Image (tube, coloured by chain):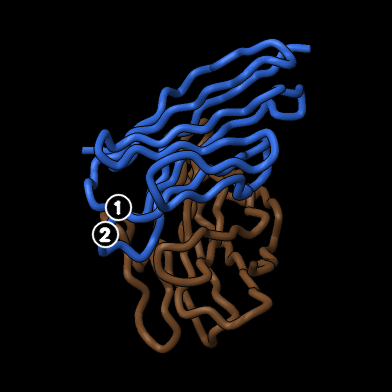
Chain colours: A blue, B brown
Amino acid sequence: QKEVEQNSGPLSVPEGAIASLNCTYSDRVSQSFFWYRQYSGKSPELIMSIYSNGDKEDGRFTAQLNKASQYVSLLIRDSQPSDSATYLCAVNPTGANNLFFGTGTRLTVIP
Amino acid sequence: SAVISQKPSRDICQRGTSLTIQCQVDSQVTMMFWYRQQPGQSLTLIATANQGSEATYESGFVIDKFPISRPNLTFSTLTVSNMSPEDSSIYLCSVEDGPYTEAFFGQGTRLTVV
């Protein structure tokens, strides 16, 4: 059973719209959750981390965590073409030293 | 946040040869992680490298194929041995600030085996 599941997409949104990316995880007692952005040919870079239920906002990005439902999402407001990338959800399951990554969702923002 | 320098950034290698990838961190870290990312896929953990002990390998990865060194708290190498075209991938080293914290990545090594 995969630890982290994401819709692979691709997801296309028009410029200025809200992009919604979703992720579910299997380890009920996971404690830390992350969203990474990966441009083609580049390494992943951290966008958001979230540890508690609820919303966490940083600029145009909002991470949402619901531990009871075991899902975490990322909203990107006012999407820009420069947001076009693959977004990776990562979870640190209990007892694991490393992060487990989802397969990523490819987002395209259309000008 | 840690700054990680990884090299080479890319290489094209003949099958049957070996390539050693280096990863240098600007601070001391207990664990370093090596990931593989095959085309269009997510990151798969190869092994965890601890200073002063043998690396811990994930299922499907063995030391003979991917020997790892960790001579000190800021440096590690991953060797891809006896390469075949199936080893063509991006290899990434990573560190974490502490338990349950975010991971930081090197620039990655894009390996093509011909």
The number of numbered badges drawn on the structure is: 2
- Residue depicted at 70% across the width and 60% down the height: B8
Name which quarter of the figure residue A25 lies in: top left
For marks 1 and 2 on the same chain, the one whose residue lies earlier in the sequence: 1
SS for dot 2 = loop
Residues behind callouts 1 and 2 on a single chain: yes
Q: Position of residue A45 (x, y in %)?
A: 63, 48
Crowding at dot 1, Cα within 10 Å, few <14 / some 14-19 / many 20+, comes out as: some
A109 vs B14, left or right, is: right
Q: Is residue B24 above or below residue B6?
A: below
Q: Position of residue A94 (x, y in %)?
A: 26, 59
Q: Is residue B50 above or below residue A75?
A: below
Residue position for label 1? A30
Q: Measure how far apart labels 1 and 2 are at the Cα level.
A: 5 Å
Label of residue B15 in the image:
none
Residues tagged 1 and 2 counted as in contact (Cβ below 8 A): yes
- Residue depicted at 64% across the width and 59% down the height: B106
Can residue B111 be spotted in the picture? no
- Residue depicted at 59% across the width and 41% down the height: A57
Residue position for label 2? A94
Q: Position of residue A36 (x, y in %)?
A: 56, 43
SS for dot 1 = loop
